Image (tube, grey):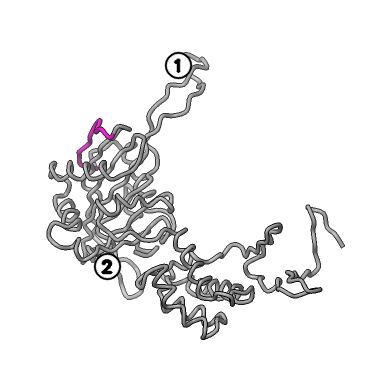
Amino acid sequence: MNKKEVLEIRKQFTPENCAITRICGCYVDHEKEKKTELKKAFLSLPEEEAFKYFDIFRHTLSGTIGKNLINMEFPLDQELPGGTQEFLLKLRDSKLEDDLLIEEFYDKIIENYVYAENYYIILIHAVYDVPGKASDGMEMFDASDTVYEHIMCSLCPVNLTKAGLTYNAETNNIEDRIRDWIVEAPMKGFLFPAFQDRASDVHNILYYSKKPEDLQPELIANVLGSTIPLTAKDQKTSFQAIVSDTLGEECDYEVIRNIHDNLNEMIEESKEAPEPLELAKPDVKRLLQKSGVSPERMEAFDKEFEEIAGEKSTFMASNIASVKTFQIETPDVIVKVNPERSDLVETREIDGRRCLVIAIDNHLEVNGIEVF
């Protein structure tokens, strides 16, 4: 799913557009015991309660694609009878009215979700009549030709409010505040099937993680059955290792600066594209060649890429690029440069020592004091 498709589904989580038919919930304590469950038609919820749920659902489709929101594909073995895809399809097609299926789903979550405190499992079923589009791109709400039926799960921490004092209007006193258990914004979640090209894609699932570095491999593997992707941090580390090992002794400042500049240029050029920029093996190879890596060193590229990342791996450009800063470090000095002005810094040999040379235009400050 791309950003536009995610936003289209997010827009359904409002009273005006609500397509949710049913909601189920299970409150799990820190000992992994089910404490209470909820099963009802979503539209039967009190208005204020529904608003709180809408906020949770929007959070489950928030963040950056490739970091917080990750498109995952089912491996072929999980699309066979008995696979996780079949189970999720049964859950969707049941419209959450099969109690045994719902309990089985809760049990799978409880067994595989690593969380030491209390949490609330929320599961919804929705049916979205996808509006047709006229030739000028305007939506035609009376011309729906596709129905997107889906389920979405949100896993929300339940925490005790902080102790403190409060004003009691009834007694006109400052008193000790009553501490409540509050359902907070989700930490994990998923949308199935994915919404691709404004239609259902049962071969893919959209996974949400509030913390990009904590993807919960057991949850992904055993509940969703999807291929576990590299985290954003792991993608950057793997890319850096590929560059470093491919270049070897040719890993000099100029080449690394060229890679930085060329990568950021690629991101800028793709800014208006609906899909986030991803780099597969051939794309990384072209990037290194364009950045000045010699043909001799490029002979090692294929081997290094496959050993470090795997033949089929791709890197989200936003995960491997430093778009906000260009940083140079020595053991005792850290220099941060505007990423668009990396040309201001170069390396030179002065009096037999390798030095960083920084071009200064009209203004120089040291500890906030302008110097001349």
Q: Amino acid at mark 1?
A: Glu
Q: Is residue 39 magenta?
A: yes
Q: Nearer the viewer, residue 354 or 312?
A: 354
Secondary structure found at label 2: strand
Residue visible at 80% across and 56% down in the picture:
366
Q: Where's residue 74, x and y in %?
A: 25, 62
Residue visible at 65% across and 65% down in the picture:
338
Residue visible at 51% across and 67% down in the picture:
240
Q: Where's residue 138, x and y in %?
A: 34, 68
Secondary structure found at label 1: loop
Q: Earlier in the sequence, mark 2 or mark 1?
A: 2
Q: Residues within 10 Å of mark 1 (few under 14, many from 20)?
A: few
Question: For mark 2, what is the residue?
Answer: 132
User: Residue 307 got which mark?
Assistant: none
Q: Quadrant of residue 196?
A: bottom left
Q: Quadrant of residue 48?
A: top left
Residue visible at 49% across and 65% down in the picture:
320
Highlighted magenta segment, given as a residue range: 32-42
Q: Residues within 10 Å of mark 2 (few under 14, many from 20)?
A: some
Q: Is residue 125 above or below residue 28?
A: below
Q: Is residue 93 above or below residue 131?
A: above
Q: Where's residue 39, x and y in %?
A: 20, 38
Q: Is residue 49 magenta?
A: no
Question: For mark 1, what is the residue?
Answer: 170
Q: Amino acid at mark 2?
A: Gly
Q: How many marks?
A: 2
Report the predominant secondary structure element of the magenta stretch. Answer: strand
